[in-house]
Image: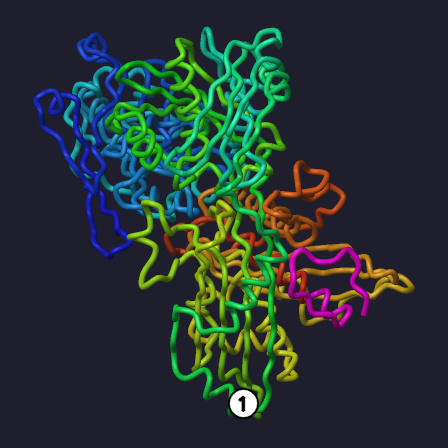
Amino acid sequence: MGKIETPDGATRGILNVSRRSLLKGAGGLALGIFFAPLLRGMDALAAGGPLEPNAFVRIDLDGTVTVLAKHLEMGQGSYTGLATLLAEELDADWNQVRVEGAPADVKRYNNLAFGPMQGTGGSTAMANSWEQMRNAGATAKAMLVAAAAQRWGVPASEISVSQGVVSHAASGRSAGFGELVEAAAQLPVPEQVQLKDPKDFKLIGKRDLRRKDSADKTDGSALFTQDFKLPGMLVAMVAYPPRFGGVPRKVDSSKAKAVRDVVEVVEFRDLPHGRSGVAVLAKNTWAARQGRDALVIEWDESQAFTLGSEEIFAQYRDSAGQPGLPATSKGDAEAALAQAAKTVEAEYEFPYLAHAAMEPMNCLVKLSSDRCEIWNGEQFQTVDQAIIGGYLGLAPEQVSLTQLYAGGSFGRRASSVSDYLLEAVAVAKAARDKGVDAPVKMVWTREDDTRGGYFRPAYLHRVRIGLDQAGKLQAWHNRIVGQSIIAGTSMEPFLVKDGIDHTSVEGISNLSYAVPNLQVELSTPTNIKVPVLWWRSVGHTHTGYVAETMIDEAAVAAGQDPYAFRHALLESHPRHRAALELAAKEAGWDKPLAAGAEGEKRGRGIAVHESFGSFVAQVAEVTVKADGSYRLDRVVCAVDCGIAINPDVIRAQMEGGIGFALAAARHSAITLKEGRVEQSNFHDFQVLRMNEMPKVDVHIVPSAENPTGVGEPGVPPLAPALANALFAATGVRLRKLPFPAQIKA
């Protein structure tokens, strides 16, 4: 029985269940996961069929190894990482390995980092699957070896496995996986397996291991929700109220129904998350859009949210003038500030941000009297099953979720209220109530996606730090004001403690720098009704910026080098230090930055931050022209994410995180005016353009620690490293995001 150490420190095992014992009624439960085989019917069982020793692997008669991935592939490389873990212990031929999305089943596929819940998020895919997938592969390998030993009449200890071939060197005999599948399927599943010593890894840590989703995405065979169709399917497009909280008062659908191929118009309102809308169902997307545009709707906005961004931040500034709830209280920050030789004060503003995934939200629903079937890029299976089941009066297991590829998410598809899925189900139900019994695919346009809410919350920070005569950091007082992502959701009991939403203060409440007096307070407004959700790296998106720009200001106030100042304050954090040291070394921090052309100023900035168990340091190099416009020339990134499962995926995720963060630093903001979202598409919610992407050098810190995540941790250090570089070039501190287009000294 392989061991897994859970977040609470307990050690629990993986229980493998043979198909024979399963049929006898035996079973096993390990941390909420039931490792039953994925049976392919009684005929396959009687014939020996494929080898399916657990819920994560199937080996077919042709030798194909199918990995069942419990985590969504949305571009972050999870399919490749999970397959690598399993194939490593199986000693499979990488070319014979394929990946399928696992079905929604919390008993077999729960996320060990989340507890009894299936889902993808928080950069947990590799961390929670590290031993689980390796055990799954080792179990299948042990059964193949046992089958070969039995067939050849030799000890199992004399048999070796390499690249999908089982061999006995002494007799010269060998067999491919497919040749042994039927015999192996009849054997008992071993209760204990031996995992490899890391020094024997052949796939884990290997560079240039081809990603398992690349070919399908290149030749167009990959199935995203937008590609998936069912016979008789209708497309739905929804007209939403222009302000959050509005409801339809009067709907004239006559012109919409006159559009060719429009089938029906339905309304939904009073959903559990509060959204209302009017949907047009048609035989194709274009007709649905034309029909929606032809609707004449009078909206009741008596309960709608009507504040604009300026009014929201004015309220936040008022709140920051009063004490908030204590998130961290160490020493006496106020007293230390009163005695400080030098103090620095700052106020920061962070806007709402849309996720802007390349594939807008969509969902395909098929309803029957006792079942709801959904196809989509599914990220939060257990939450979605519970909420949709509750809405329809079904048990969660009556809601089936088929996991397709997702064209990005950045947190948007992990909705704690199942918003867009629930709306798709509501449309399908309303259509069925009107006699239109057909599968329904709800499709959002880019405008729907940009204005649809569930943004990264807007935040305001008010910070004071104090240093003594020797330039040592003595005090840090930080007030944060912003909406809670978690309050009012099913996750509140787990992530909100004493009124503190952990996602609002993470990264600053546990500040890594040695400061004897630290006070972090949080104020959470309850009258701001803008729907909010986690956004790639969640609270670290703003707390990391504040921490790393304020520590830079402290270094300048102390008259010290920003790298050396950080290094000294991280004495008790060796992994922070290692990432910081590697980034500084590879960037040539100890050497002067090359001068720019005439009239240009150049600057270099550094930042280091831990998020989701990974440690990332970045050095940014900028050039500022005479008119104040600037370009980010290069980013040197060092990452410690434990054992590097797929180095190329790690590099890609760091590069992607840097580009994602740079867009938010330079351009992106969602603003409201009188409650209406002002942005609509990429022309006014600008993401990064190709010519703005800097040269990126990624270096991986060698580590023997268990793997941690890489999907999110590359984001937080970029903006502060860039801001610190711009300060080095211009002397201007940037405390409001996004940055202005021109920054003059």
- Taking 597 as reference, is 53 left or right? left
Name the spot of residue 181 as percent of width and height, x first.
27, 18
- Taking 46 as reference, is 179 left or right? right
Name the spot of residue 404 as percent of width and height, x first.
45, 25
- Taking 278 as reference, is 624 left or right? right
Amino acid type, callout 1: Ala
Which residue has dot 1 on it?
Answer: 340
| Any part of residue 66 in sight | yes
- Taking 115 as reference, is 729 left or right? right
| Any part of residue 701 in sight | no
Q: Nearer the viewer, residue 428 or 227?
A: 428
Q: Check disc 1: other Cα within 10 Å, few if <14, some if 14-19, many if 20+.
A: some
Q: Secondary structure at mark 1?
A: loop
Name the spot of residue 656 as percent of width and height, x first.
59, 44
What is the magenta range? 725-745
**Residue name at image x 12 percent, y 20 percent:** 23
